[in-house]
Amino acid sequence: MTEYIISNWTSFNLPIYFFDMDGSSNGSVIGAVGSDSSIMISINAGQSFAAKHIVKNWSCITVGGDGRNIIACESDGLIYQSISQNKSHNIWNVIGGNIPRKHKGIKMTPDGTVIMSVELNGYIYISIDSGATWGQSGSIQLWTDVAISSDGYVMTALTENAGIFISYDRGNTWSNITLLNRWNKISMTSNGVIQVASSINGTLHISTDSGQNWNSFGNVGVWGGVGISSDGTTLAAVEFGGYLHVSIDGGTNWIQTETAKNWWGLFVSRDSTHESHVISATADDEG
């Protein structure tokens, strides 16, 4: 099994299949996690990665705005956080308690104040004090992924079989958008207005009104990671057994790039650097 990381359209191999990726606002720090692997961290926009923490079955990761705060979840275990001023990320501590959970998605605001996670066949968990304390929110669902606005007020959570759940008050109340799909991954702009979501055995969907209404686009497939820049101009999505798709005009036109592979993880930097964005994606090239 070989891993491809695409960063500014340069590819190289790693012997790990990553399930989830995230990065700092400018894309200089990227974190990736997978099954039976270490947490992999890059501090040079994906040109090289270093293994951090011990080998575990990791499921999801989130990176703070400046890359100094990284949180990763075990697929059936605990949540770990590393705060590193020099971005070495050699020290990791458990946050959110010592109760093992089947973590499926986690996101934090760029400043790390608000953190949101979901578990499979469980609840939504939210911290508004940088992970010091956590509250349980929502109902028991087959949650799959989450996204959060930069101020932490707009939250979106996906499920496998019960639609999409939206909150505009940091998770105090939720509205269920009963658009049924086997939802997989989600990303949103900094203000939460534009959101893009993927589904398994379905299409991609985009919302331009903070998740109230969704429009389908793209072919039916097994869609993996999706990403969107802070201003909504750059979007990307990957298809398992398909291609890496990129739009630089807010989703109006899409470019199919790279060869057909089993793509899964994806990250798009939130802020532009020299009118471009760092786009990193992962794929298993065997099969």
Image (tube, rainbow, N blue to C red):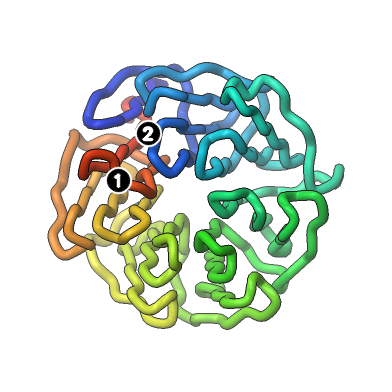
- Asked if residue 285 lies left or right of residue 51, the reply is left
Q: Position of residue 13 (x, y in %)?
A: 35, 18
Name the residue nearer the viewer: 26 or 182. Answer: 26
* Observer able to see residue 145: yes
Name the residue nearer the viewer: 33 or 242. Answer: 33
User: Who's the residue at 57% across and 52% down the image?
Assistant: 107
Q: Nearer the viewer, mark 2 or mark 1?
A: 1
Give the structural element (helix, strand or loop) at label 2.
strand
The image shows residue 138, relative to residue 1, as above or below, that is: below
Q: Amino acid at mark 1?
A: Ser
Report how many numbered discs are placed on residues in the image.
Answer: 2
* Observer able to see residue 117: no
Give the structural element (helix, strand or loop) at label 1.
loop
Marks 2 and 1 sit apart, C-alpha to C-alpha, by 21 Å
Q: Amino acid at mark 2?
A: Thr
- Asked if residue 182 lies left or right of residue 251, the reply is right
Q: Position of residue 177 (x, y in %)?
A: 50, 81
To which residue does mark 1 refer?
Answer: 272
Q: Position of residue 15 (x, y in %)?
A: 45, 17
The image shows residue 173, relative to residue 258, as above or below, that is: below
To which residue does mark 2 refer?
Answer: 282
The image shows residue 132, relative to residue 137, as above or below, that is: above
Q: Position of residue 136 (x, y in %)?
A: 78, 65
